[in-house]
Amino acid sequence: MEKQTAMERYDLHTHTQASDGMNQPAENVRLAKEKGLTGLAITDHDTVAGIAEALLAGKELGLDVVPGIEISTRVGEKDIHVLGYFVDPEDNRFKKRLARLRSVREERNGLIIAKLQQLGLSITLEEVKAGLSRPLRPDESLGRPHIADTLVRKGYVSDMRDAFDRYLAEGKPGYASLPRISPEEAIVWIREAGGVPVLAHPGLYSDDDLVRSIVERGKPAGIEVYHSDHGPEEELRYAAMAEKYGLIVTGGSDYHGVRQGVVFHGDLGGRTAPPGTVERLRQTAAAAWAEGN
């Protein structure tokens, strides 16, 4: 790719059907091209299954595709997500580790369904999978948005946001979580797969002391300052934190596609990374690889 300019626009947080997004990976790439982006990252939850298709589409359309991941971790009672950029999607040890995480996610989904049933909602995991309208591949994963989609289709809630606000968000009656790896472990996994770890959407955790603790202990390379659920105050706060700790500032929409006419979390390209971010991530990954080899 040519040297990046101040006009570059990268959405570094998007999801596909490989996890809980609505679109095929190639469709995310096509949309990014249509919106005039320079490139995007594919960052599915606990899987790299969508990367190969996206890379091929990017090559065909002349769009820069960053291979990524979003790993689910846990600290106490709080779910924390860690993004990884320029991971090697063919790293066998990494893929085996991710497979273990998906098995935990599958067990968690079963617990959520059981809680919803106890609340009097008639819903099964089979119905959730049927809502995909296609077979679920072994390297793909279901998430809460899939369950929310089923709740909407069955008329229990008005839309995706209503499903999370009433049942599926942390602290709500249908929420469930299981022990997972720590953010620090996820950071190590990403680095060992050749990638650059970045703490995802810190504003969603509502605990800046915890965010600082993760940054100080795990030493990620970056922090996601610009996100669809961050307002101007969060952006300023986390930009200052990035400067204090010498972190790369990243940004992305957390695009999951459109369900029942609602975009979740934000539209593709609605949040982008500052110019030069991808080059910094690329150089960081290359330097780490050179040091390790």
Image: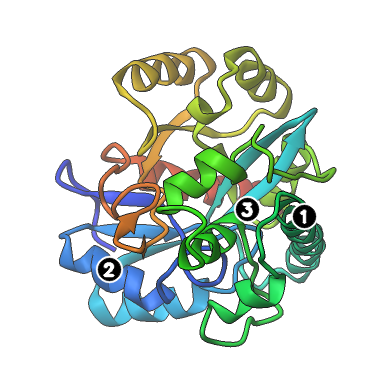
Q: Tell me the quarter of the image containing the N terminus.
A: bottom left
Give the quarter of the image for residue 276: top left
Distance of label 2 from label 3 (alpha carbons): 24 Å
Q: The disc labelled 1 sits on which kind of residue? A: Arg
Distance of label 3 from label 1 (alpha carbons): 35 Å
Q: Earlier in the sequence, mark 1 or mark 2?
A: 2
**Neighbour tally class for label 3: few under 14, some 14-19, many 20 plus, Cα within 10 Å:** some
Mark closer to the observer (3, 1): 1
Q: Earlier in the sequence, mark 2 or mark 3?
A: 2
Q: Estimate the x, y position of residue 177 in percent, counting from the top left.
A: 76, 44
Q: The disc labelled 2 sits on which kind of residue? A: Leu
Query: Looking at the picture, does residue 114 appear above or below residue 162?
Result: below
> Which residue carries the number 1 mark?
108
Viewed as shown, does residue 261 lie left or right of 135? Answer: left
Query: Looking at the picture, does residue 34 appear above or below residue 252?
Result: below
> Which residue carries the number 2 mark?
63
